[in-house]
Image (cartoon, helix red, strand yellow):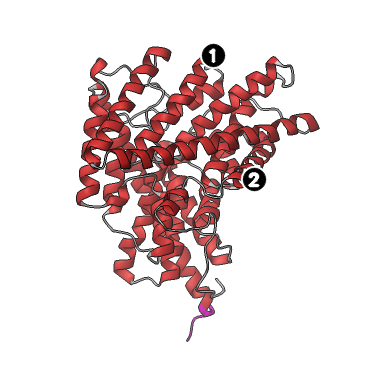
Amino acid sequence: MGSILYPQAREGVFLVLLGALVGLLTGLGAIAFHFLVAIIHNVAITGKLQFDQNLNVHTEPSIWGWALPILPALGGLIVIYLARHYAPEIQGAGVSQVLEAIHTREGRMRRSIALLRPLATAITIGTGGSAGREGPAMQFGAAITSWLDTIMVLPTHRRVHLLGCGIGAGIAAVFNAPLGGWFLAMEVILPDWRPWTILSTLVATIVASQVTVMVFGNFHLLPTVISTPVNQTMPLLIFAGLGLVEALGSIIFIVTLSTTTHISERLLPNAYVRHALGMFLVGLLLLLSLAVTGHYYLIGGSYVGTGDILRGTLTDTNVLLILLVLKLIATSLTIGSGGSGGIFSPSLFIGAAIAMLYGYCLTQWHVLSPHLMGTIGLCGMAGMVAASTGALLSAPIMVIELTGNYAALLPAILTAVSAFAVRRMFMKDSIYTLPLRRRGVKIQENHYVLENNDGR
């Protein structure tokens, strides 16, 4: 007897099962990556052999004291060694490399990236670099496809779809944001809205998220803020204005990162010298942050710093402005000089800081009620991420999942839409596609040409 499923359905079910497998492996990889970052961070900076790290607690002052900048410089040398001898794709934010693989290599990636990328990013972040955890988790999920390809020899269209599953699963696992991860994969990596593709990607993100929940609990990475539903004309216009401000901030962020990369490569052609010097400067910025605020706000994705902004414990506008500039520079130096890590998390901090400065100005002018400040900060994150990464739909959804603040969905969407639109008016490339364009790889933002229109 033949199968009761028609051929396209059989292939679709198989794709869903593969998506679940990718989600499972990505979730397990994200757990291992969390503990790897934690042990490197704890041993290198605090001198303690601890295997876990609370991302909502500030790092205590380093045992290195004023010699701290040496630590990220040494970590940078190790990262460059791994990149030069094994896989140069482990450098950068990760998403750009996946896009390049999809558009120029039929979705093929080095198998070694699945192991080397988490290691390189763990070294970058663990020794004090300013970068997020989501980039390597996404690239790890995508690289799993390369291992599956060796087992079952995947056709190009299925390989590309599984790359999307891996990207979505990676961000879902790190942030416990299955919907946000799914939207990100569907709009940034693989804009393919056919039924089985949609389902397989969603299954991957749900499975990855549930795997991490089984270990860490049903967590929100950022604190929930007090938010009042916004439905009046004036407050909605305020959030549209916030989108404009975040768009300008995103352009500065994109240009700063791109310029740092270009200038550092031109002035310092030796990769080891370039990255070691860049990370040494990041270490100096860490000392400056400690001197000004008492904390290393710039380390990693600055989740605790973003949380302090949302809680309202960082209210000094001068300090906020200083940290905003320092985070922008530190992230550009970390990634632009050759480091390994994500851009999404730094975007959250930058977006929240810009939004709170915007909100404080409006409250001083009696335009904004102080009780909306928490919502302003949350929506600022959505606007910055949407404008800088091109994640128009996923940015507000992910910010809501990160905080559990569902009442702020409407203003978050409005901020993201206006920020994305304004940025596209002045700059057609996102922070992911601009580096590729400057290398001669022309990839349109949020665009993928389907070559296998098989009805899935």
Question: Pointer 2: what residue?
Answer: 421
Where residue 1 appears, as percent x and y from the top left, is 47, 86
**What percent of the width, then of the height, locates residue 161?**
46, 63
Tell me which residue sits at (77%, 34%) in the image: 231
Residue in view at x 47 percent, y 19 percent: 322
Q: Earlier in the sequence, mark 1 or mark 2?
A: 1
In the depicted structure, whether residue 372 falls above or below residue 249: above
Residue at 33 percent of width and 38 percent of height: 264
Tag 2: residue type? Answer: Ala
- Badge 2: few (under 14), some or many (20 or more) residues near its Cα, within 10 Å? some
* Residue, far bottom: 1
Amino acid under disc 1: Asp
In the rendered structure, find residue 427 and report the number of the disc placed on it: none
Looking at the image, which is closer to me, 139 or 331? Answer: 331
Q: Is residue 4 magenta?
A: yes
Is the stretch drawn in magenta largely helix, strand or loop? loop
Quarter of the image with the C terminus is bottom right
Residue 410 placement (x, y as % from top left): 69, 39
Magenta residues? 1-7
Whether residue 67 is visible here, answered yes or no, is yes
* Circle 1 SS class: loop
- For the point 40% across and 35% down, the residue is 332
Lateral position of residue 218 relative to residue 425, left or right: left
Q: Please say whether residue 315 is visible from this viewpoint.
A: no
In contact (CB < 8 Å): disc 1 and disc 2: no
Sort mark 1 into few (<14), some (14-19) or many (20+) by Cα contacts within 10 Å: few
Place residue 22 in its image quadrant. Answer: bottom left
Quote the CA–CA distance across marks 1 and 2. 31 Å
In which quadrant of the rendered view does residue 370 lie?
A: top right
In this figure, which residue is indicated by the disc labeled 1? 316
Question: As drawn, which residue projects farthest toward the front?
Answer: 267
Any magenta on residue 390? no
